[in-house]
Image: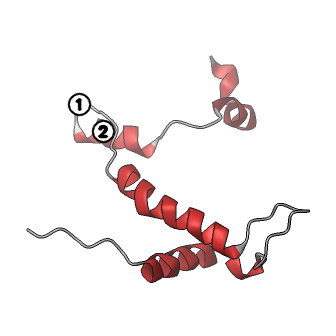
Amino acid sequence: MSQAQPPTQSELDAYIRTRLALAGVDLDLLPEQPEPETGVPTREQALNALRAFVARAPAAIAGWSPPAEGTPAAIYAQQASPPLLYPSITEAWTGKGDEK
């Protein structure tokens, strides 16, 4: 079994730009030259950072699965309800924090 080749820089750029476009983000709105007054990253700085992230993080994230024991239904229920980043805010919005 042969290992897949890592994507080229142009393939990463196309993937990044497509994902950002789907989210409504246009990298072309970033400046081409640094703007020290605002600190906004240039297009190239943003693409470099996103390339580095995409090249390493998604594989680690995609390969992770929560430890689960029990029936397949219990395992699915655990994965379908991931932990909340800010449970106190969600509980306040939904009113479920008062049930404790």
* Residue, disc 2: 75
Residue 91 falls left or right of residue 77 = right
Badge 2 amino acid: Ile
Q: Are marks 1 and 2 in contact (CB under 8 Å)?
A: yes
Residue at the location (36% across, 75% down)? 7
Which residue is more in the foreground, 89 or 55?
A: 55
Secondary structure of the residue carrying numbered label 2: helix
| Residue found farthest to the left | 1
On-image quarter of the C terminus = top right
Q: State the image coordinates of residue 64 (x, y, percent, origin top left).
A: 34, 45
Residue at the location (57% across, 68% down)? 48
Badge 1 amino acid: Gly
Which residue is more in the foreground, 78 or 55?
A: 55
Residue 52 falls left or right of residue 28 = left
Q: State the image coordinates of residue 79 (x, y, percent, origin top left).
A: 39, 43
Density class for disc 2 (Cα within 10 Å; few <14, some 14-19, many ≥20) is some
88 versus 11 height, above or below: above
| Residue found farthest to the right | 37
* Residue, disc 1: 70
Secondary structure of the residue carrying numbered label 1: loop
Q: State the image coordinates of residue 76 (x, y, percent, origin top left).
A: 33, 44
Q: State the image coordinates of residue 12 (x, y, percent, origin top left).
A: 46, 75
Distance in Å between CA atoms under marks 1 and 2? 7 Å
- Residue 99 in view here: yes
Q: Earlier in the sequence, mark 1 or mark 2?
A: 1
86 versus 25 height, above or below: above
